Amino acid sequence: MSIRLGGIFAGLLITAVLVLWSLVPGVYNFAFGPPAEKPASYAFYEHGEGPAGGFSFDGAFGKWDYAQLQRGYQIYKEVCRACHSLKFVSFRDLSELGYTDAEIDAEAATWTVPGIDPATGETTTRPGEPTDAFPLPFPNAIAAAAANNNAIPPDLSLMTKARHGGPNYVYSLLTGYGEPDPEKAKKIGFETPVGLYFNKHFPNVNIAMAPPLAIDGQVTYADGTEATIPQMATDVAAFLTWTAEPSLVERKQTGWFVLGFLLFATTLAFFSYKQIWAGMKPKKA
Ligand code: HEC
């Protein structure tokens, strides 16, 4: 056997020993370690699949449904804003949802934002302007926690990016409230602590947010759409997808353009290859 082959075998042997050795602690723990303790809530969690028909922006040809985004904004404004901020979105961004400048001026003015008295420099409040971001519902985190059973309602601007499942998760969370199966709960000794609410799509199934969408017809939609709970949940989830990624539809369309360009460039490259090699005869063996 040549020295070279011997070297390769020695290397392979060392690698094999190292790989096996690295598995030892895992195998040991698997065999003798304590069983992984699953919390009782684990028995009730259900992965949410999102709205039945999906969203208009799903898939490679997805598009915004602007009427839906406007309805979603209405839900944020009439329901969620009591507790959740939307601090990375400004009133003027709403122009992308199809509102005119005059409508945005009027809309911004219906909100109260923090301001400064120009004469004394003291902090006051004033009506919003298009360049203002959506104001915070609570002055600080302590106030937010105190009002919500010690849980701080998170900012919603980027929520659909921050949670696995994105808009499907938000939809499922909003429609996932209910009661746990009483027999099963009794058997495993599961109880929702006082001040929390059972929600089968929240990872630990006890959430500090009271069901925000509780009855059909909770809001009256300006466009006449029937405001059922699933409808409201779909609309606000769509709106929060837009706040988190306003360029989502554009991104998908750019993708198609890039694919088309690559196809064109490949065809061009193929024909120039043909052209360049046209004069060469294949070598006879
Ligand atoms: C009464 C106050 C209140 C209202 C109104 C409210 N929420 Fe919440 N929300 C909370 C609190 C508190 C939490 C934190 C819950 C926790 O961590 O247990 C929360 C958490 C959330 C979460 C994050 C859940 C997670 O995975 O961490 C989402 C998403 C959410 N809310 C969406 C909404 C939407 C959409 C609306 C409007 C339809 C809304 N909320 C209305 C109080 C509220």
Image (spheres, rainbow, N blue to C red):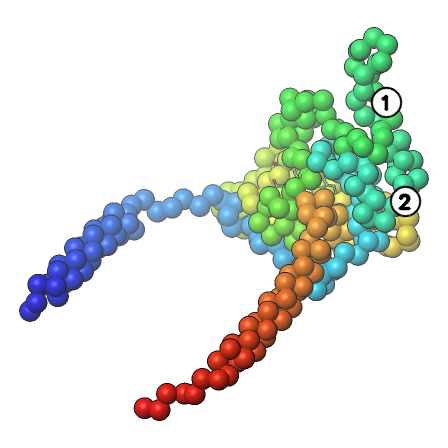
Q: Which residue is mark 1?
A: 126
Q: How many neighbours does mark 2 have within 10 angstroms: few (below 14), some (14-19), or many (20 or more)?
A: few
Ligand 1 under 8 Å from disc 2 Cβ:
no
Q: How many neighbours does mark 1 have within 10 angstroms: few (below 14), some (14-19), or many (20 or more)?
A: some
Residue pushed farthest front? 279
Mark 2 and mark 1: span between their CA atoms? 22 Å
User: Residue at the spot x=88%, y=39% of the render?
Assistant: 104
Can residue 229 be spotted in the picture? no
Image-based side of 3 in relation to 58, left or right: left
The count of marks equals 2
As displayed, is residue 152 above or below residue 58? above
Image spot of residue 39 (x, y percent): 47, 43
- Depth order, front residue of 228/167: 167
Residue pushed farthest bottom? 284
Residue pushed farthest left? 1
Q: Which amino acid lies under the numbered mark 2 shown in the image of this protein?
A: Thr
- Depth order, front residue of 255/220: 255
Image-based side of 248 in relation to 104, left or right: left
User: Residue at the spot x=43%, y=88% of the render?
Assistant: 281
As displayed, is residue 269 above or below residue 89? below
Foreground mark, 2 or 1, reads 2
User: Residue at the spot x=81%, y=20% of the render?
Assistant: 115
- Depth order, front residue of 22/33: 22
Q: Which residue is mark 2?
A: 100
User: Residue at the spot x=61%, y=49% of the render?
Assistant: 201
Image spot of residue 220 (x, y percent): 89, 46
Q: Secondary structure at mark 1?
A: strand
